[in-house]
């Protein structure tokens, strides 16, 4: 090795060590090219000084040439120039070159450069393509993230993102303002430190009632308006909270909430006004209805046919107004939790059958066929009788009657022609009552709002059909009060099916509750004081004629006595109409089936 080659080798070693230990990130390519060039000069000098094409250092040149493509054309072109220059110089110095020398120089000097170009050019194209795709994706994600951040920051509701460990990852300005927490203070904290939830009893929520934990466990969205949030300063406000899952179960949640304290106060004021107004107006409406009933009663008034038609329409409107006030009172009671609850053991199949029978004349008057599938009426429809299981519930039968009657009446009302089919089915845990009609159906866009207060489907098919929009809302609230649920499946112009699901009790539990009710009734009867026997004189003949036979008339024709007026004695002694008693369920074996 010559002294010059040794000097270049030492310089290359020192520069390589220095650049390995420290090199600016922006100068990596330049410094790498410098070291590569020094190695190229060193190997070229070694080859020239040790025999040219026959030098043992040819293999080092071939190895170095393969990596020339790393620096693209800037690395390959100088190597090609160096090989060709050596080839010309050797030709001039020797006066010619042998075939073996030319082959050696081409194969050892230029072929590796061609291979290097092919390898590294393709690699750079792939990397360039992947880098471009990566940059495009990164830019797109960056734009989406920026837009999402703008949207989230512009939302008036509080938004908090929580990961699977319950750590807050995002909090928008609205949440910061509502809770009194700064962004830097809230991030990376447990959500329980920021979202301090309390229930209606002002107690901290437990894990079973914590909506965040429920969503992390079930991966189902949770909505609630029964919890309060405490700010950093200790102030509390009622909140409407929606917790939605993110990704797979347990991955994280998004919490969206807002202050509904004022809304709740306004709802309470409205409910109180509606309740008070309905209660106060029900009395004058009943008086009007009573006077109109007197006018329609041929025993108390004589009117011509034209006046009777006018008064009949007025009487129907007064009855409708009375039902509206009653619905408003029931709605206010349902919202305030003041609905009565008198549960009784009841067989749903026989109970629903009586309701269907009571509404059968209304359906027949409209020309509709009504079928009760568990016990079809052979006199109305040619249907084979079948066995039906016994479904017991322990619930308030007045509430169930109101729901079922409302669903059947709606089916009759919104079915111009065709069938109304009522069925009872269920499993070991639930009883399901369905009311199916072949009526006008419900548009898909109206179904999510159907059970809202005062909501009515508004289209050409429903504008001539009366209604207040309270029946389905009240039915849903009653179903929830009973521990059940109410939903609908419908297709526009093809009919609807409403489903009422109620909790079922077993035969053994039903028999036990019936026995308890019987024992309680017997005990009450035993301790009730008995009246003393008092001899009663036989009524005078005039009195006998006065009270016999008893007369029971509907309100439309029953005599009504306004306050402050003298009434006919015979009208005073007529008994008040009595509502039929509730259906009692006789004990029966679980295996017994009804035909």
Image (cartoon, rainbow, N blue to C red):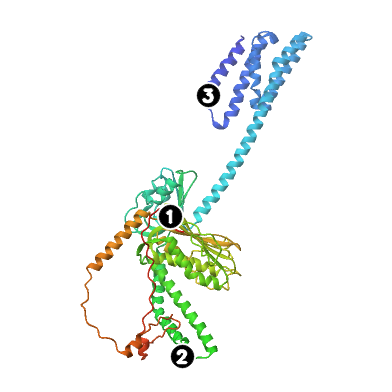
Along the line of sight, which residue is nearer the eye, 475 or 67?
A: 475
Q: Distance between the residues labelled 2 and 3?
A: 117 Å
Seen in the image, is 15 located left or right of residue 251? Answer: right
| Dot in front, 1 or 3 | 1
Q: Distance between the residues labelled 2 and 1?
A: 54 Å
Which of the labelled discs sits on residue 301, or is there none? 2
Q: Distance between the residues labelled 1 and 3?
A: 76 Å
Along the line of sight, which residue is nearer the eye, 95 or 115?
A: 115
User: Is the C-beta separation of discs 2 and 1 under 8 Å?
Assistant: no
The image position of residue 63, as x and y in percent, is 63, 17
The image position of residue 330, as x and y in percent, is 41, 70
Whether residue 217 appears in this view of the structure is: yes
Few, some or many residues within 10 Å of mark 3 (<14, 14–19, 20+): few
Q: Which residue lies furthest to the right in this view?
A: 95
Query: Which badge, 2 or 1, is on the more N-terminal residue?
Result: 2
Q: Quadrant of residue 88 in the image?
A: top right
Q: Name the residue under label 1.
A: 430
Q: In this view, does 97 lie above or below 297?
A: above
Q: In this view, does 40 lie above or below 361?
A: above
Q: In this view, does 280 lie above or below 175?
A: below
Query: Which badge, 2 or 3, is on the more N-terminal residue?
Result: 3
Q: Label 3's element? A: helix
Q: Which residue is drawn at 50% across and 53% down?
A: 152
Q: Residue at x 51, y 83 (%)?
A: 312
The image position of residue 556, as x and y in percent, is 45, 82
Q: Mark 3 points at which residue?
A: 20
Q: Residue at x 61, y 25 (%)?
A: 33
Q: Is residue 444 above or below residue 368?
A: above
Query: Which badge, 1 or 3, is on the more N-terminal residue?
Result: 3
């Amino acid at each position: 090795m010559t002294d010059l080659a040794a000097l270049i080798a030492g310089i290359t070693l020192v520069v390589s060590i220095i650049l390995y230990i420290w090199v600016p990130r922006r100068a990596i390519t330049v410094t790498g090219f410098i070291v590569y060039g020094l190695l190229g000069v060193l190997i070229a000098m070694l080859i020239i000084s040790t025999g040219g094409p026959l030098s043992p250092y040819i293999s080092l040149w071939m190895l170095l040439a393969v990596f020339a493509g790393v620096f693209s054309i800037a690395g390959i072109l100088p190597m090609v120039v160096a090989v060709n220059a050596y080839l010309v110089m050797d030709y001039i110095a020797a006066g010619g070159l042998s075939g073996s020398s030319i082959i050696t120089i081409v194969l050892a000097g230029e072929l590796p450069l061609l291979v290097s170009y092919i390898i590294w050019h393709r690699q750079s194209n792939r990397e360039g393509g992947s880098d471009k795709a990566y940059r495009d994706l990164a830019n797109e994600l960056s734009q989406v993230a920026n837009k999402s951040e703008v949207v989230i920051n512009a939302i008036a509701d509080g938004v908090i993102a929580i990961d699977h460990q319950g750590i807050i990852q995002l909090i928008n300005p609205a949440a910061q303002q509502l809770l009194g927490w700064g962004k830097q203070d809230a991030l990376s904290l447990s959500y329980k430190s920021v979202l301090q939830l309390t229930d209606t009893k002002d107690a901290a929520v437990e894990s079973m009632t914590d909506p965040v934990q429920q969503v992390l466990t079930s991966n189902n969205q949770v909505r609630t308006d029964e919890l309060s949030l405490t700010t950093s300063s200790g102030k509390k406000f009622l909140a409407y909270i929606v917790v939605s899952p993110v990704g797979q179960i347990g991955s994280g949640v998004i919490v969206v909430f807002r202050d509904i304290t004022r809304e709740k106060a306004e709802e309470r004021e409205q409910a109180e006004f509606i309740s008070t107004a309905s209660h106060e107006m029900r009395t004058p409406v009943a008086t009007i209805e009573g006077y109109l009933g007197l006018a329609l009663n041929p025993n108390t008034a004589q009117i011509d046919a034209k006046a009777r038609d006018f008064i009949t329409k007025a009487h129907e409107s007064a009855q409708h107004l009375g039902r509206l006030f009653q619905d408003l009172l029931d709605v206010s009671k349902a919202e305030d939790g003041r609905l009565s609850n008198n549960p009784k053991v009841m067989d749903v199949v026989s109970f629903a059958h009586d309701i269907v029978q009571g509404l059968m004349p209304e359906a027949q008057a409209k020309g509709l066929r009504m079928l009760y599938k568990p016990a079809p009426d052979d006199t109305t429809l040619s249907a084979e009788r079948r066995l039906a299981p016994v479904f017991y519930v322990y619930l308030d039968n007045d509430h169930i009657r109101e729901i079922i009657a409302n669903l059947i009446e709606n089916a009759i009302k919104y079915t111009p022609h065709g069938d109304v089919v009522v069925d009872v089915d269920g499993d070991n845990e639930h009883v399901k009552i369905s009311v199916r009609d072949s009526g006008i159906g419900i548009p898909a866009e109206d179904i999510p709002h159907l059970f809202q207060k005062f909501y009515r489907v508004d289209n050409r098919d429903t504008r001539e059909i009366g209604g207040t929009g309270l029946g389905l809302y009240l039915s849903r609230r009653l179903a929830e009060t009973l521990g059940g649920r109410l939903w609908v499946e419908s297709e526009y112009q093809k009919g609807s099916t409403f489903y009422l699901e109620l909790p079922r009790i077993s035969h053994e539990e039903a028999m036990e509750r019936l026995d308890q009710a019987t024992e309680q009734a017997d005990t009450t009867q035993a301790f009730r004081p008995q009246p003393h026997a008092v001899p009663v004189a036989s009524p005078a003949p005039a009195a006998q004629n006065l009270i016999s036979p008893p007369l029971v008339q509907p309100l439309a024709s029953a005599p009504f006595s306004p306050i402050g007026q003298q009434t006919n004695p015979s009208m005073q002694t007529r008994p008040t109409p009595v509502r039929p008693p509730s259906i009692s369920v006789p004990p029966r074996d679980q295996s017994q089936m009804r035909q």
